[in-house]
Image (spheres, rainbow, N blue to C red):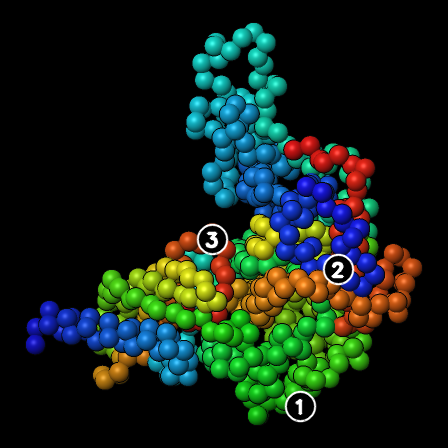
Amino acid sequence: MTATMQTAITDSAVTAFLYQEARLADQAKYEEWFGLWAAGDIVYWVAPRADTDPKREVSLVYDNRDRLEQRVARWESGFAWVQDPRSKTNRIVGNVEVVELRANSVTARANVHICVSRRGRSEILVEHVTYRLDFNGTDYSIVEKKVVLLDEDAPVGNINFVL
Amino acid sequence: VTVDVASLLGPGWVDGSVYTDEAIFALEQDRIFRRSWLYVGHASEVATAGDYRRRDLAGEPVILVRDRDEQLRILMNRCRHRGNLVCQYSAGNAQFFRCQFHGWTYSNRGDLVGVPYPQSYDGEFSRTDYGLAEMPAVDTYRGFIFASFDANIAPLAEHLGEAKRLIDIFVEQSPTGELLVQAGVQRGEYLGNWKFVGMDGYHTNFVHRSVDVLQHTKRDIDPNDERRAEREVDLAPLEFGKSPDKLGNKAQDLGRGHVHIDNSPQRLAKADATMAEINGTPAGRTYVIAMEDRYGTERARTLLCAPDPHLGLFPNLQIIGVHIRVIEPMSAGRTVVVQYPVMLGGVPDEINEQRLRKHEWFFSPAGFGSPDDYEMFERNQLGLAAAVEPKVLLTRGIGRETDLGNGVLQGLYTDETPQRGQLARWAELMHSPELEPAVR
């Protein structure tokens, strides 16, 4: 198999994986969504800008495994009023690019547009997302997901769902 | 517009239209926001000469700047020529502000220093008459910068009153007394009235039940943790269904619309465990030693174990947890909330990092706590649209408060003492028919 073919296969597999993540998020299947994450240390980060240090600047989300697990548990608890009723989301994942390819890991970028509808109002969230994925030869899993919203200055409303 | 303020509230009740009526909102802008001390920013945000931050005060664009002489100024972001913006960026460092429309240029002291082709103005024209306008009153307390549109407003220290003591507690989280408001910002918004952002002990167990449930799942408590029992006890106070009043926390009306939820009784009751926890890491130990060196053992213990005043300063500032929160009313039914997590001078980096993570956990617009508050505010706005029986009931604990003698009225934790205090000030400022509308 040529290097080009290998790259094409990887691009396609990574894109399929990101589509799967988007679908589970839209369906609010949070436990299954959490299952896409790697087993060890993970970072789920919604950063204020691309170039920022989370130790020195506040983020919307900076979750390690424990906190992400708690976040999922909160969404599933039935007591997260901000998601009662739930925000319906429909997300388009595009411009997927594999930017670094190793034997056991992949770094990929994507643009994501999330259409959000709740209580008769709709809005669109626009994101740049960077993924670090582990690859075990069969499956991908998320080690780090970094989200940067397009408009860092705009106030955010109800964003208590997968970003 | 005529609004009969006296008809809108009485002892223990307020008419729902106070939260929903756009005419009342417009009057609030004149009578409250143009006649009060408004929080603008913190001195550490403009730490060196030339540093500036753009802000909005009652909808007016201003520039908070430390000028070339190190003096803090609040300049109106409006060219004296035809009113264009002179500062375009949200923050930066500049010697000059220039209007790009016709090139009028101002120093960071606000002086008009350049007018292109000045020969076409008549002999009467003098640049000294056209410096940038400034907020009529500016004053600071421990680095907190306030301004007012009312040049004759009472001194800030008088306005803050008892709240100063609580600001002190917030400042003295730092062993050097330095707050660093340099850790970014979070902007959230909700479709509800600005006055919903108050201090309320009654809501905690209901609105934040998800947090309570998570804590009781104890999934994050290692079964081999030696202090497991202690941690589990820590979680007990939020237990759903039991009144939290018995924990001893208090709700206070500090006067002038300032309000406070005093969580210190509950926190100081477990001070030993808190001190053990902070001392459990090298960074924490360093922090404790620095605090004891600066403030003495007793005061340091109080500052470290009951660090978190829930303070509301009428009309636009709150200090909660580790953050400064600014309320920006946009309309009767829309409010922007701006949050600045505050870092401490003189502590190990790990301590400040912990503050950020703790803040994000509960207070972030994507966090586990505040979003449920905002959801309640939105539902409240929707519910108030039903105006057949318009009174909102605020009688909880009325008439049984303790007068602490320093202008502070204290109720139990779940009492509506803060709501009544906030609305009393609201009515006092709104019900002033003898006053002309403030000059815009």
Label 2: how many Cα within 10 Å (few below 14, some 14–19, many 20+): some
Q: Nearer the viewer, residue B436 or B113?
A: B436
Q: Secondary structure at mark 3?
A: loop
Q: Nearer the viewer, residue B27 or B415?
A: B27
The circle drawn on residue A154 is 3
- The residue marked by circle 3 belongs to what chain? A
Which quadrant, please, contains the N terminus of chain B?
top right
Asked if one can make out residue B20 in the rendered structure from this viewpoint, the answer is: yes
Amino acid at pointer 3: Ala
Q: Secondary structure at mark 2?
A: strand
**Residue at the spot of label 2:** B14
> Residue at 54% across / 31% down in the picture?
B78
> Residue at 73% across / 63% down in the picture?
B391
Which quadrant, please, contains the C terminus of chain B?
top right
Lateral position of residue A127 relative to residue B184, left or right: left
Q: Quadrant of residue B269?
A: bottom right
Give me the C-alpha separation between circle 2 and circle 3. Answer: 33 Å
- Nearest to the eye among marks 1 and 3: give it: 3
Give me the C-alpha separation between circle 1 and circle 3. Answer: 44 Å
Residue B264 versus residue B66 in the image, above or below: below
Residue B317: image location, x then y, percent: 67, 53
- The residue marked by circle 1 belongs to what chain? B
Q: Secondary structure at mark 1?
A: helix
Residue B290: image location, x then y, percent: 69, 63
Residue B22: image location, x then y, percent: 62, 49
Amino acid at pointer 1: Ala
- The residue marked by circle 2 belongs to what chain? B
Amino acid at pointer 2: Val
